[in-house]
Image (tube, rainbow, N blue to C red):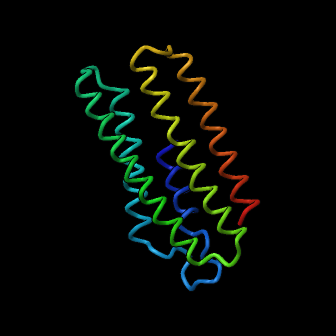
């Protein structure tokens, strides 16, 4: 589900602040790269969950974290482009809030997963925490998009 949901969320971020522009997405190569890194990040999390070999799993986790950093970099670049085109201070605040919410909420997913893999929480707790964070992230994201832009 995340392989389809998060790229759409990133595409929405890329399209923000473009209401007065000729193009819906101002930098398609940047948006595409960010979405590809996002898919790599999700797949690496899946690989880490599925493999039996711990060393290979942790290597996949490291690759996923690296891909996540690239996603965050892309989010920053896309938001900065949107801020340049923002017409009001309210728009700028809304765009930056959405950017920071994205960082904050998306960072919880690997923290929860790593907590499970290291034995800090059990499988049931991981599933509950992931479901709650998924709902919270999507709801905050949606409300911010609808009220701020």
Residue occupying image coordinates x 58% and y 52%: 100
Describe residue 63's horizontal placement relative to residue 16 as left or right: left
Q: Quarter of the image holding residue 96?
A: bottom right
Q: How many marks?
A: 0
| Depth order, front residue of 119/2 | 119
Q: Would residue 44 appear left or right of 16 to someone viewing this image?
A: left
> Where residue 114 sits: x, y (%)?
42, 26
Q: Vertical placement of 105 versus 34: above or below?
A: above
Q: Residue at x 64, y 31 (%)?
A: 132
**Residue farthest bottom in this picture:** 22
Q: Residue at x 64, y 45 (%)?
A: 138
Image coords of residue 139 (percent x, y): 69, 45
Of all residues, the one furthest to the right in this rendering is 147
Which residue is depicted at the point 69% across and 69% down?
Answer: 91
Within the image, what quadrant is residue 127 found in?
top right
Residue 84, image x and y in percent?
A: 56, 76
Image quadrant where one finds the C terminus = bottom right
- In this rendering, is residue 143 above or below 82? above
């Amino acid at each position: 589900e995340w392989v389809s949901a998060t790229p759409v969320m990133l595409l929405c971020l890329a399209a923000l602040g473009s209401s007065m522009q000729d193009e819906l997405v101002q930098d398609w190569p940047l948006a595409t790269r960010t979405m590809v890194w996002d898919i790599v990040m999700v797949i690496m999390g899946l690989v880490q969950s599925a493999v039996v070999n711990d060393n290979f799993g942790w290597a996949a986790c490291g690759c996923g974290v690296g891909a996540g950093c690239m996603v965050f970099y892309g989010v920053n670049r896309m938001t900065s482009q949107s801020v340049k085109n923002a017409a009001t201070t309210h728009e700028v605040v809304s765009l930056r809030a959405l950017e920071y919410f994205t960082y904050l909420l998306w960072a919880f997913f690997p923290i929860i997963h790593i907590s499970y893999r290291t034995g800090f929480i059990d499988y049931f707790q991981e599933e509950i925490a992931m479901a709650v964070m998924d709902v919270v992230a999507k709801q905050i994201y949606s409300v911010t998009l609808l009220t701020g832009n």
